[in-house]
Amino acid sequence: MRDFLPGDVRRRQFVIDVVRRTYERYGFEPLETPALENIETLTGKYGEEGNKLIFKVLRRGEHESSGETDLALRYDLTVPLARVVAEHRSDLPKFFKRYQIQPVWRADRPARGRFREFYQCDVDAIGSRSPLVEVELCAAVSDVMRELGFQDFSLRLNHRAVLTGLLDAAGVEPARHGDALVVLDKLDKIGRDGVIAELGVRQIPPATAGRLLDGFTERGSNDLTLDRLRATITDDGGRAGVENLAAILQLAAPTSAGPALRLDPSLARGLSYYTGAIMEIAVADLAGSLGGGGRYDGLIGIFSGEQIPACGFSLGLERILVVMAERDMFPPSANASAPDVLVTVFEDRDPARSAQAQEQSLALASELRQAGLRVELYPEPDKLGKQFKYAAARAAAFAAIVGSDELARGEVTLKQLSTGSQESVPRSRIASWIRAHQT
Amino acid sequence: MRDFLPGDVRRRQFVIDVVRRTYERYGFEPLETPALENIETLTGKYGEEGNKLIFKVLRRGEHESSGETDLALRYDLTVPLARVVAEHRSDLPKFFKRYQIQPVWRADRPARGRFREFYQCDVDAIGSRSPLVEVELCAAVSDVMRELGFQDFSLRLNHRAVLTGLLDAAGVEPARHGDALVVLDKLDKIGRDGVIAELGVRQIPPATAGRLLDGFTERGSNDLTLDRLRATITDDGGRAGVENLAAILQLAAPTSAGPALRLDPSLARGLSYYTGAIMEIAVADLAGSLGGGGRYDGLIGIFSGEQIPACGFSLGLERILVVMAERDMFPPSANASAPDVLVTVFEDRDPARSAQAQEQSLALASELRQAGLRVELYPEPDKLGKQFKYAAARAAAFAAIVGSDELARGEVTLKQLSTGSQESVPRSRIASWIRAHQT
C-alpha cells in the first residue's frame, strides 16, 4: 500500500477524469458503495483463492477479544453492484448503466503494477441480454484507451459456453473442465508443450490435450476463427455462444471497438460468476491485462432471487498508470502542480510595519485568487532571496513583490524567475499580465 | 454505511469539486494515503474514546485464526499526513501545503449527518509557525463555504494556551483541566447552571466554576473579548496565546475569513494533539460543526523525532451535504444526470434487417458522442413506445429515431419528449440542433 504524493495524485486524477468523461458520454451514471461490506456478501463469490485474499475486520466493543469478524473490505466492484441492484431495484432505472471508480483491497503478494490497495474503474449495464450491451461496453472502453493515448491495444473476446463446447468437443469430461481451464490459462507462460504436460498430470491424455489446444488456437482472422468454432462445436449451448460472438463482432465493426476486437478461444477469465461473453484488454508491453469483463446473468439473482441479466468491464487504474508512465504518455497538464505566482512577504523588524506588509501581501494574494490564478503566499516574513529560492523550487513562474514605494504608486513588482527580469505592473493589470507572460 | 446512487454521487462530486478548486487556488496540493495503516500508527493518537472506535483488520493466512490484528482503517487524515511528512520529508517542499479528500472510518453510533464511513476534506500547511498560516487556512475554508452558497457561517477561534490560562486564572488545578474542558464543551446543550452542577460533581467548587464561565464568555466584539482575555490571563503561555489570536484576527480582517471570525474563549476542540490556535466552523441550523482544525506543532515529531510545525482544517463532507440538501442549495448542474439524447433501436422480425437497424443506431450514437453529447443507446430492439417511455423516465430531452426512409435521405427524426413534437434533421446537424433546442 502506497502514499500518493501530489504528482502521483495528479496523474491518477488525469486518468480518472478521462474514464469518467468517456463513460458519462455513453450515458453511464456514477455509483459509490461503502468500503466495508458484510462478510457474507463477499465470501463464496470469488472462488477458493479469492476467499483467502479478503481483508476481514474485527468486531468492535465487547466482541473484540473474541477474534470474530463481521465486516470485510470491498474485493471488487461487481459483487457490491449486484448487491446494490438487488437492494435498490425500485430506485433504479429499468436498464441501469453505472460506472464506479473506487479502491478495492486484496491481501495478495505485491508485484509490478499489483498492489494490495488498488483502484478499479468499472462500467456495467444491467437489465438486457442483447449483444448491443457487450458492444457498447467494448466501444466505451476502446474510447477510454484511445483518449488516454493507447493505439496498440487489443480486446480479446470469448464466451463461456464456447469454452465448454470446446472442452466437450475435445473429449474432456465435465468434472475436469475447471482444471483444464486453469492449465490453459498458462499457455502464454509455459507454451503448448508445457500445457500438454500439465494436463497429463491432471489425467487428461495427450491426444485430448492436443485436440483441445487446436480448438483453442486462433486462426488468421475473426471470420476464420468463427468458421473453425462453428465446425468444431456441436452442443446447443456452445453453438449459441458462437453466434452470440458473431453478433457482437458484426455489431461492433463500425464502432471504435471494431479494429481492436480479436476472437480468442483460449481466453478464460478466472472469476466464476461469468455466464456469457468474456473480454480482456491488453497492450504489447505488459504481461497480463489492463482490464477485463464479461456477462454475469446469475450474480444478481444470488442476492435478489430474481434473475437480472448483467454485463460489465473493469479497467485496472494502477496497471494503466504503470504503462503510461513507462511510455511517457502523460500530457504536461497531468503533471502541472506549480502555482502561477508566489506572493512574497517583506521582512521588517518593526512589528507594526511587519504586520502591515503581511496584510498587503494577503490582500494581493486574495485579489489574484479572485481573478482565478493559483497563488501561493509565502507563509512568513523572510529574506527575499530565500523566498525567490522557494518559488523556484516550487516551479512558480513569477514572484510578486509588494514594496511600499510601489504600493504608493498602485503598482506591484513582478519577477520572472526563469530570467530574473523584473517589471513594475499596475495592480489592476497583474492577473492579465501574468496570463500574458506565461509560457 | 451507505450506498450512493447516481444523484448522491453527483451532489458529493459537486461539493468535492468546489473544495478542490478552491484549495488549488490557494496553492495547496493533493495527497492521498492508503485506507489501511499499521495499527501502531493510529493507536494512542485520538484519546481513549478514539482508540475504541478504530476498525481493526485481522491478520491474514496462517495468523488469521489467532484473532490478531496488524492493520487499521484510517481514522482521520491528520495522523496519516504527519506520518507521510515524517516518511517523505526529502521529497516534499520546505513548506508543504496539501489538501486531501478521502473517506475515514469510525465505529461510532450513527446519527444525523454522522456515519461510520465518511469523507473528510482536509487542508494543512506544514513547516511554519507564522499566524499567516492560520489566516490562509481560514480564508480558504471561508472561500469554500461562500462558493457552496453559505452566507451565514461563523468561524469560531480560540487557542489551547488561552484555555489553560483561563483555567489557571479561575483557580482550577491543572489535574482537573481535562475534566473541566469536557464539561465546558456541553455549555450549548446543558446551559450555565448545568455546567456549574456538573463541575461540582467533579470537585470544582461553584465559585471557581462561576469565574471560569465568566472567563469563557464572549463579549460584544472580538476586540472587547481580547481586552477581557488580556485582563484575565496572567501566565506567559496564555498571554502569548492571546497575542497570537490578536495577530490572526488583525491579519485576517481584509481576507474572506474576516467577517466570519468570532473569538470564542469557550471553544475546546476534542482532539488532544492541538497545541495552538483552534478553529471551528458552524452554521445556524446544525447542532455541532461543519468542520474544524487547529495548530498541532507536536504531532509530526512523534513520527520523525524532529519537531515540525503544522496547522490544518478539516471540513466534514456529509454534514455539509445534509445542510445543503435541507436548504435546497444545489444548482441544477449538481443534479443533472439525464442524457442529452436517447438513440432508439428499431425492432424488426427479419434478423438481417434487425442487425442493420442496430448497426445504424450504434453508428449514430457513436457520431453524437464524438460531437460531445451525452448519448444513451436503448440496449435492445423494442417497441418505440416503450423506448420513449424509458427515455422520459431517464429525463432525456430528446429521442432519436433512425428510420430507413430518413436514412436514405441522410436524415434522422428527433422527438422532443416534453412536447411530443418531431422534426426530421440532416444527420450532420443533429448535435447542433440538440444543443440549440436544449432548455
Image: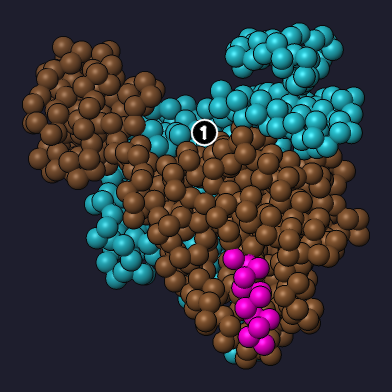
Chain colours: A brown, B cyan
- The residue stretch that appears in magenta: A205-217
Q: Front-most of B413 and A52?
A: B413
Q: Is residue A384 above or below residue A224?
A: above
User: x and y percent of residue B315 in the render?
Assistant: 54, 44
Q: Main SS of the magenta segment?
A: helix
Q: Say which residue appears at 77% left-offset and 73% top-offset.
A: A168
Q: Say which residue appears at 24% left-offset and 18% top-offset.
A: A436
Q: Say which residue appears at 89% left-offset and 29% top-offset.
A: B383
Left or right of A273, for residue A304: right
Left or right of A377, for residue A11: right
User: In the structure shown, which secondary structural element does the residue marked by tag 1 occupy?
Assistant: helix
Q: Front-most of A227 and B396?
A: A227
What amino acid is at disc 1? Val
Q: Quadrant of the N terminus of chain B?
A: bottom right
Q: Quadrant of the C terminus of chain B?
A: top right
User: x and y percent of residue A117 in the render?
Assistant: 52, 64
| Res A177 visible | yes
| Res A13 visible | no
User: x and y percent of residue B290 in the render?
Assistant: 59, 42
